[in-house]
Amino acid sequence: MDTKQIEYILKIAEENNITHAARKLNLTQPALNQQLLRLERELGLQLFIREKNNCRPTEAGRIYLENAEKMLQIKQETYRILGDMAAVQKGALSVGFTPGRGSTMFSAVYPEFHRQYPNVVVMPQELSVRSQQALIAEGRMDIGFQTLCEGHKTQDAYVPILEEEVFLVIPSKHPLCQEPVCQCVPQTRQETAPSARPPELSIEALRHEPFVLMYKESTIRQMVDQIFKEAGFHPNVLFETASNATILSMIQNSLCCGLVPAYYLRNPLPGIACFSLPSHPTWEVTASYRRGTYLTKAGRCFIRLAAEFWQQG
């Protein structure tokens, strides 16, 4: 199925500029413009309003673009299904993951995946959860590995991998650490013997302490804000970051307290003490893909390998 012309028109709409679109497509501007004019003559309708530095779709153009995207999705879906029927699995798999835990997972999982599917090209992208969700919804990413709460889920399909607890972490020199406390935690509560669980501590005891929190757009921030809201106070926020490693480093240097997922506390870290919150807040580690699309054997394999990696801690 030759869909080149469709891809050309979609790129013009994406860039809102024929020259920019031509550059992205490795075409000359006159060649791309001729493709558009040829299609408009064929349809007897103008698809774009051309302005000096802008190209915006007409009403007919919007209808064409909407259905053009559907045609490309049908092509992709058909090729995925047929690819799984072939004796040798080929093709491409675009995989998204979050910074930190995602890149560690990919480095551990990819060698085994490549051994099983040597002819499948993997295209990894390190992106925030929201960026992954946007690409999945547009059909531009096959699988996204995400950490989120129920309220952050879109209409896409989600494969649960594990439920992860979020812990209160403070400097080990803090006055509240009068007795030895846990420096690390297992990744899931199911793996933890009651005697090995971190002791409970109400966050209200730290209402006057500085906190370093994940940035407001992160999927964990809604949960963190809710924890403080239920405790009845607004935290003294030293600053916000996109890295749990940064939070832990600041705590190790006795500069702040923080709320950190179990994954980042699975190994002992000097200078920190971990506590369970009385409510034991959790969020999910999941794999996501576009609902209603065919998930290939290669895609299912990658999800299985990632799940094994995270579930083994």
Image: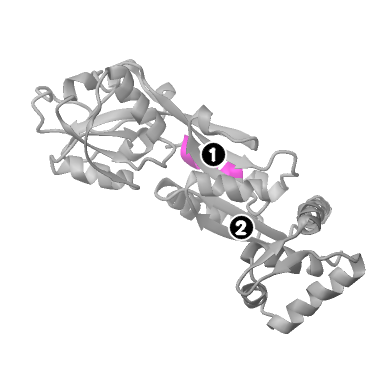
The answer to which image quadrant residue 13 occupies is bottom right
Q: Which mark is residue 115?
A: 2
Q: Position of residue 141 (x, y in %)?
A: 63, 52
- The N terminus lies in which quarter of the figure? bottom right
Q: Secondary structure at mark 2?
A: helix
Answer with left or right where residue 275 lies relative to residue 98. left
The earlier-in-sequence mark between 2 and 1 is 2
Can you identify the residue that label 1 sits on? Answer: 307
Task: Compare residues 304 and 234 and report the one nearer the observer.
Answer: 234
Question: Is 84 within the magenta?
Answer: no
Q: Position of residue 252 (x, y in %)?
A: 17, 42
Question: Colour scheme of this structure image?
Answer: one colour
The segment highlighted magenta reads 303-311
* Dominant SS in magenta: helix
Answer with left or right where residue 226 lies relative to residue 80. left
Crowding near the residue tagged with mark 2, few <14, some 14–19, many ≥20 C-alpha atoms within 10 Å: few
Q: Amino acid at mark 2?
A: Arg
Q: CA distance from mark 2 to mark 1?
A: 18 Å
Task: Compare residues 52 and 182 and report the one nearer the observer.
Answer: 52
